[in-house]
Image (tube, rainbow, N blue to C red):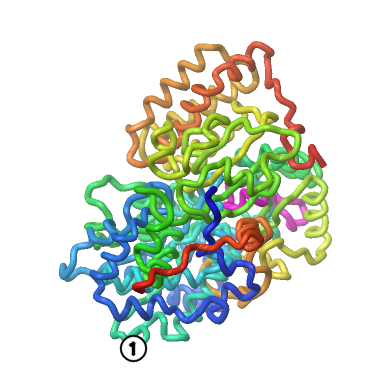
Amino acid sequence: MSRGFSPETRERLERDAKEIIGRYPKPRSALLPLLHLVQAEEGYVSDRGEEFCAEMLGLTKAEVVGVSTFYTMYKRKPVGEYHVGVCINTLCAVMGGDQIWDELSEHAGVGHDESTPDGKVSLERIECNAACDFAPVMMVNWEFFDNQNPASAKQLVDDLRAGKQVTPTRGPKRLCTFKEASRVLAGFPDDLAGDGPAAGAPSLEGLRIAKENGWTAPAKEDSE
Amino acid sequence: MTTLTPVLTRNWDQPDSFTLRGYGDYAAARKALGMDPDAVIQAVKDSGLRGRGGAGFPTGLKWGFIPQNDGKPHYLVVNADESEPGTCKDIPLMMANPHALVEGIVITSYAIRAAHAFIYVRGEVLHVVRRLRAAVREAYDAGLLGTDVLGSGFDLELTVHTGAGAYICGEETALLDSLEGYRGQPRLKPPFPAVAGLYACPTVINNVESVASVPSIVANGPSWFSSMGTEKSKGFGIFSLSGHVTRPGQFEAPLGITLRELLDMAGGVRAGHRLKFWTPGGSSTPIFTEEHLDVPLDFESVGAKGSLLGTRALQIFDETTCVVRSVLRWTEFYAHESCGKCTPCREGTYWLKHVLKRLEKGEGTEEDLTTITDIADNIVGRAFCALGDGAAAPIHSSIKHFRDEYLKHFEVGGCPFDRAASTVWENA
């Protein structure tokens, strides 16, 4: 494997890195976004990606590796173009996440942290993703795919592998790739914020009931 | 009967609720910027708002701990790392109503004299990150952030910072280490963040919902807020119902509402089943059972019954659910997420996981229950942060309420439950 990025890539990454570093009072705070940035370039955090971060921040490579290996989202080897997570924390697992995982893993022929041979899809057993009222939950490139079942999960992965367009439940119409997602996480918007609903149906359940019954918060203080 | 009080959730059904136009003109921030910063702190103290991230510390009091005229920069850090199993309120809040948070940040930063604020949002929620960044950009463009906010002379920079998958970063001092570019590991307290927080400067760390509640307090007055809730747990909060419920979802209600009332609104436990156990505030809060249906969900009442209000993450499990399997899965989570700094938590969660696996397979003995109780006892109070205590909560409470179910596993030589019966599609 060649050492370092090509001069053109390096120049582009340096420009992005300097912009990120400029957002913080102290440069080292930029390390997590910089790791997202190099992950956006290569689909995982490589040796040269870590070296780049170290150089940008005046750290040793060991200091960078100490950080990158601590956080689950930084991948040690390339993941699929579409990184598929199945929530297996208690609530989702009980509601069917365990069965989804078992069937999906067998269907795709890959296990936890493994990719399909075509490099299209990788699978991960993920922890609670803060969408418990949409259980069982799956994520693809960290977009929400709510209320899944084994059949929908398998269809989703088949569609991803066939290059068909799939749409997250609460997210943009077009699902972006893992690299594109990593770039958004590094702090470079893709202008898709306006896509998708403001909220999913369960998020609105209480509001719906309040409106039906005419319930509101009290009126504001008279003196105010 | 307690009724719902939508404030933060009020506009979520509007298609443009996440835009500045859909949100409003930051009237509360305009009002606050015309007040003395100390008066803003006093208003939040008077409201009785307590932290919505789990611990319930009085928000205004926390702000008041920031030393003034100390010549150091002050920072506001919003904890948007929502990762506690069962907790799912801040993520929909930031997706549907990010400007409530940004406006709260303007007001809070002004009150504590911070010129730079951060939103530390977990990385695994891409669309929420987009919505936050878009809201922040809109606020800059409208002069609500940046230099001379609304012509008041107050300057404020706001940086959205994405985490990278570590539950521990929801612990406030681990979050600070992570934000400084290190492994997210908790710090010893004292010094508390109010004295030595981000970059060793005075720092307020508040939960998303706490900060987002501030504009309503400034706009409507502290006594408006304190007219809701109970004696010591004032105001409204978002209650998240999930699991074996007919219509799960988010319910914004005064603190002190009961699970029975919330379940009635949500159509009850799913048809043909009955409540077995539930968490009042996420997996780190000791489990409750049917006998706790009428406990007012406020800090004091839940505490008096041996659990914690936590994040009001009400995970509902019916009689088809195996307690041992559930506790094992939570324990695997804590073992995975333990940062490794403190030996009792790092080693304890590892051994808890292995003994529980044996128990679930029906290969344990009654002595194993003593063992896991001992291990849990040796974690509680012996780790830097609350993750360790949280890991012990499901162990202690499940043995207390469901000891027989543990015993049953090795009587029958396996799990006596049919997993398929618990799934969403079982009734379909």
Inspect the image, locate mark 1, and give the three-letter code of the amino acid beneath it: Gly
Residue A152 drawn at (x, y percent): 80, 51
Element under disc 1: helix
Q: Nearer the viewer, residue A183 or A63?
A: A183
Image quadrant assignment for residue A54: bottom left
Q: Is residue B294 above or below residue A28?
A: above
Q: Is residue A79 above or below residue B25?
A: above
Q: Is residue A73 visible?
A: no
Residue B212 drawn at (x, y percent): 44, 65
Residue A163 drawn at (x, y percent): 81, 64
Chain letter of mark 1 equals: B
Residue at image position (25%, 52%) is: B192
Q: Is residue B74 above or below residue B139?
A: above
Q: Is residue B419 visible?
A: yes
Q: For residue B74: magenta?
A: no
Image quadrant assignment for residue A98: top right
Residue at image position (30%, 81%) is: B34
Image quadrant assignment for residue A188: bottom right
Q: Quadrant of the C terminus of chain B?
A: top right
Residue B204 drawn at (x, y percent): 31, 60
Residue that sits furthest to the bottom in the current view: B151
Numbered-mark total: 1
Q: Nearer the viewer, residue A145 or B352?
A: A145
Question: Could you tell whether B162 is left or right of B45 in the image?
Answer: right
Quick one: label 1, few (<14), some, or many (20+) residues within 10 Å? few
Q: Nearer the viewer, residue B245 or B120?
A: B245
Residue at image position (45%, 50%) is: B255
Question: Could you tell whether B103 is left or right of A140 in the image?
Answer: left
For the record, the magenta segment spans A115-134
Residue tagged by mark 1? B151
Q: For residue A124: magenta?
A: yes
